[in-house]
Amino acid sequence: MNIAENKVVVMHYAVSDSEDTLIDSSYDHKPLAIIHGTGYLIPGLESALAGHKAGDKFDVEVAAEQAYGQREDGYVQTVPKSLFEGIEDLDVGTQLRASTDEGEQTVIVIDVAEDEITVDGNHPLAGLDLKFDVEILEVREATEEELEHGHVHVEGGCGHEH
């Protein structure tokens, strides 16, 4: 069975940047299980999976525009430290949820000064071209319940209330 929209795909992957620095890998852990076409994966990887089948192994390069997008300078803001009253441990690298004009967004603290905090709303991989090493382990039809819930269920259910 070939990978197509609404098929469950179970796969291993390793992702590196353009300088071959490993960013993440599932090979030493559980494989990733997704419903193809639901937008769970970055667009470039999702489109590269289409048509493959169980047993396929391949490499794919995904440009930043088809991954996490280009970095946006406007997503970096310096704001008064007083906006963070009551939040402990405001160190470089701390992730926070912020309300923006476009809704809730994760921001990362990138600088802490005496009276100001600088946060970055860009995804940490924004602006990077990525390389994926992929191994397709299984392709199957998604169940009606999986399609309704929008995610793959493991043996014993999905483990949460709907």
Image (cartoon, rainbow, N blue to C red):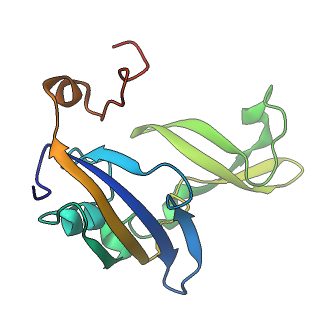
Counting from the top left corner in percent of width and height, residue 14 is at: 47, 68
Asked if residue 32 is positioned above or below residue 147 in the image, the reply reads below
Asked if residue 144 is positioned above or below residue 109 in the image, the reply reads above
In this orientation, which residue lies closer to the viewer: 150 or 96? 150
* Residue positioned most to the bottom: 19
The residue located at (38%, 66%) in the rendering is 69
Is 8 placed left or right of 18 in the picture? left
Residue 3 seen: yes
Q: In which quarter of the image is residue 57?
A: bottom left
Q: In which quarter of the image is residue 133?
A: bottom left
In this orientation, which residue lies closer to the viewer: 139 or 123? 139
Counting from the top left corner in percent of width and height, residue 145 is at: 19, 23
Is 75 placed left or right of 140 in the picture? right
Q: In which quarter of the image is residue 45?
A: bottom left
The residue located at (46%, 73%) in the rendering is 127
Asked if residue 64 is positioned above or below residue 162 in the image, the reply reads below
What count of labels does the image hold? Answer: 0
The residue located at (49%, 84%) in the rendering is 18
Counting from the top left corner in percent of width and height, residue 47 is at: 19, 64
